[in-house]
Amino acid sequence: MAAEIVNPGSASGTESAPGDSGEPFDPAFALHRGGKMAVQATVPVRNKDDLSLAYTPGVAKVCTAIAEKPELVHDYTWKSQVVAVVTDGTAVLGLGDIGPEASLPVMEGKAILFKQFGGVDAVPIALATTDTDEIVDTVVRLAPSFGGVNLEDISAPRCFEIERKLQERLDIPVFHDDQHGTAVVTLAALRNAAKLTGRGLGDLRAVISGAGAAGVAIAKFLLEAGLGDVAVADRKGIVSRDRDDLTPVKRELAEITNRAGLSGSLETALAGADVFIGVSGGTVPEPAVASMAPGAFVFAMANPNPEVHPDVAHKYASVVATGRSDYPNQINNVLAFPGIFAGALQVRASRITEGMKIAAANALADVVGDALAPDYVIPSPFDERVAPAVTAAVAAAARAEGVARR
């Protein structure tokens, strides 16, 4: 690789807010001044000999070799170590549809997390289109420069179609982190919570609040991993076969979830349930939480306000997790995506399979080990064991499933 992407460091403490108009100092604006990333060469160009090797005429030898044997691009360029972080800015964190320019600080942040936690270089790409086919065509045309594609903050239901079409057209990993990263970390936490209470996944009935990208992916993934049953609720209630207002994605979901045949409200689904998983941002009434089965698990992951406040959840649940860093058991995607991509790139995987994601979740759960406790079912993002464990597990699974190319 002839260059790497680096964090140039935060700005000094003398910055003010936008426009330098004398507003009080804001550390967030100070840190973002000039952007959070830069490109740094990995080879020196100190004299004419270096120049003739790094560029013309020496570079022509490498170009000719790659033209004759295209797979050499992985050995002699940055392709095998770089991921594109692609967004259209339509579903950014809790901000919603803010457009490509406003989404760029988030994409830069994502790229820094790739590097910091997985050693993977990443390039933010914010697209000025929300048309599904235009996004797909653009990413396909950019793909020769990258070893993988991380889709980020693209609104549902378009995110499902965009990911599917890209996976069909590209031979590199395409991964919508808002769906699958969340699902992987959720499964890891759920496995450990079940282990802590002497149960298996097959013994559990879960309820998911939210039928967007994360909710749909979590439901499918948990069932794939062996969960007993799961009901998903949107704003209109339980996603069930008897509803005539479902989108194609939700109709498909209704066919594989809610084996108990429940209909009605979220509160109806929660009665007697073993697990609550919140990815909606709504508020769940305390009586509904109280109606869950004894020893239930509450994963209220909305930010900044969980669907169930941890103080309330602890009255009724044996294990409580949130999406916040100021409470124990944070369900944070950064536990998954750096290692998943690092493992996939390490073996030049053609795609990321369900088996690779399950392997990532199992490895993440295993990091907790003998320290397993109600307030420790998932490790910290700063646990240095996480990324290596996930990377190794994903690489091994890719080889076992025949999608590795080295």
Image (cartoon, rainbow, N blue to C red):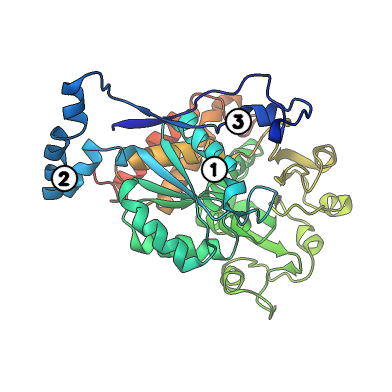
Instruction: Identify the residue at image location x=59%, y=42%.
Output: 106
Residue lying furthest right in this view?
287
Residue 63 x/y as whole percent: 16, 43
Mark nearer the viewer, 3 or 1? 3
In the picture, the quarter occupied by the N terminus is top left
Closer to us: 209 or 99: 99
Closer to us: 83 or 366: 83
Q: Secondary structure at mark 1?
A: helix
- The answer to whether residue 363 is visible is no
Q: Earlier in the sequence, mark 2 or mark 1?
A: 2
Instruction: Identify the residue at image location x=84%, y=37%.
Output: 311
Give the class, few, some or many, for how many residues have Cα within 10 Å of label 3's Cα (few <14, many ≥20): some
CA distance for labels 3 and 2: 39 Å
Mark 3 residue type: Arg
Residue 187 x/y as whole percent: 57, 46
Q: Which of the numbered marks, if any, corresponds to residue 33?
A: 3
Residue 26 x/y as whole percent: 73, 28
CA distance for labels 2 and 1: 31 Å
Q: Earlier in the sequence, mark 3 or mark 2?
A: 3
Would you name the residue on which mark 1 appears? 107
Mark nearer the viewer, 3 or 2? 3
Mark 2 residue type: Ile
Residue 369 x/y as whole percent: 54, 28
Q: Secondary structure at mark 3?
A: loop
Q: Earlier in the sequence, mark 3 or mark 1?
A: 3
Instruction: Identify the residue at image location x=68%, y=24%.
Output: 15
Mark 1 residue type: Met
Give the class, few, some or many, for how many residues have Cα within 10 Å of label 1's Cα (few <14, many ≥20): many
CA distance for labels 3 and 1: 15 Å
Would you name the residue on which mark 2 appears? 66
